Image (cartoon, grey):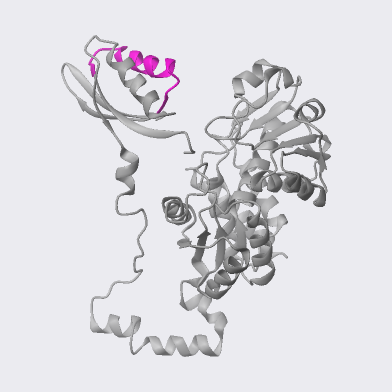
Amino acid sequence: MEQGEFMRNLIIETPSSPGNFAKVAMAIGTLEGDIGDIQTIKIGTLSTIRDVSIHCRSEEHLHSIVKAVNDIGDGIVVHAVTDDVLQAHEGGKIHMKSRMEIRSLGDLRRVYTPGVANVCEVIKEDPEQANYFTGISNTVAIVTDGTAILGLGDIGPVAGMPVMEGKAVLLDQFAGISGVPILLSTSDPDEVVNTVKNIYQGFGGILLEDIGSPHCFEIERRLKEELPIPVMHDDQHGTAVVTLASVISACKEAGVKLSDSTVGQIGLGAAGLAISRMLMEYGVKEVRGIDRNEVACERLREHGGTVAGSLEEVMSSCDIIVATTGVADLIKPEMVRKGQIILALSNPNAEIKPDVALEAGAAFAADGRLVNNVLGFPGIFRGALNANAKEITYPMLLAAAIAIVESTKSGDLVPHPLDPSVHENVAAAVERVASNK
């Protein structure tokens, strides 16, 4: 969830007769509430109680929804409003756990002293053996300075810890990788780079997370140049991989040839610039970008893109539009060109709603709710670690994007993020490219 969106659970009782929950759904939908999971708590002779998760814009929005449901009458009642998100985070979401049980003195001697000394000697003689006799090669540092946490901005690394824990959970669940959050109390590129360089030997890879622009560019570049292990800034390249996959799928649905297309990138922050570079690496005809920040525009020029003079110019001259500005309703319906593909990726409020874009003549339109980084980074790191790669390259990232496309069912923009085969396919594709270098 991004800034401006939060989730609450409503405990709702309805009479046990057909159609009553439909009234509840109608009341919530009329007020533009977004229904998530629905769990039936109790089915009685006369009534049914359900736990319904609701995505809301604000506390006031939530109160309006609760009132609307209670106002239905006919025995329909909201009994309670709960915050399951906070409850899920109580005590944190991750915990370091041993892979071995200590049940005897023999176990203790093998795992710790005196047996472990032999393993240390082996690694001393050949440091590469650490990849086999320790967890280093399966551990990724999740590094943040807290300057760009979700849509919340610069809230600091400690406030961003729930996000870092979430990344660790996803690495574990989808790729079997141990993710370790590293919270930095500095944003100075020299200090960040030196800190990571001083701790990197305990990790098989570095995942840079929620580090703001522009210092994220220098930090990533220097770490990639100076460390002998894979480094990736997820907000840049993880986003770009999944966006490229989305663009390829959208082109298939709309019957558009991507290599012959001009892509308009609206917003050239960390994600926007990375998306532009990824599209150019894939081989689109041209990328035209726009941003209010001239430095951001210059970065696009340096990487081979062109800068448009205005939003209107981008909209009128480009076949495919990708928007990552964070500005709701920036793209007006009258700007849409017939036959365009539009991916307005800002959450929770897109630059233009998909239904509005389609009504205005777009051939295909989607927002950012489906374009989730989780489709990319677990498999990318799994593949890189499996191949003992020293870096993450564009061919590896392009292979990841294509694997996502090949895992997508007909009619869908991208696969479901909980489909384990997606992460397996991404990992295998990345490993093949890395191993064949």
- The residue sitting at 31% across, 37% down in the picture is 83
Residue nearer the viewer, 229 or 2? 2
Residue nearer the viewer, 9 or 245? 9
Magenta highlight on residue 257: no
Rendering quarter of residue 98: bottom left
- The residue sitting at 42% across, 23% down in the picture is 33
Magenta highlight on residue 18: yes
Return the residue found at the far top. Answer: 74
User: In the image, is residue 171 above or below residue 16?
Assistant: below
Residue nearer the viewer, 2 or 283? 2
User: In the image, is residue 181 above or below residue 150?
Assistant: below
Q: Position of residue 399 (x, y in %)?
A: 68, 51
User: In the image, is residue 285 above or below residue 208?
Assistant: above
Q: Position of residue 57 (x, y in %)?
A: 44, 28
How many numbered marks appear? 0
Residue 172 visible here: yes
Rendering quarter of residue 372: top right
Q: Position of residue 154 (x, y in %)?
A: 52, 49
**Image quadrant where one finds the C terminus:** bottom right
In the image, taking residue 402 as reference, residue 102 lies left or right, namely left
Residue nearer the viewer, 307 or 317? 307
- The residue sitting at 31% across, 17% down in the picture is 67
User: In the image, is residue 127 above or below residue 55?
Assistant: below
Q: Position of residue 148 (x, y in %)?
A: 54, 49
Q: Which residues are magenta?
A: 14-35
Residue 411 visible here: no
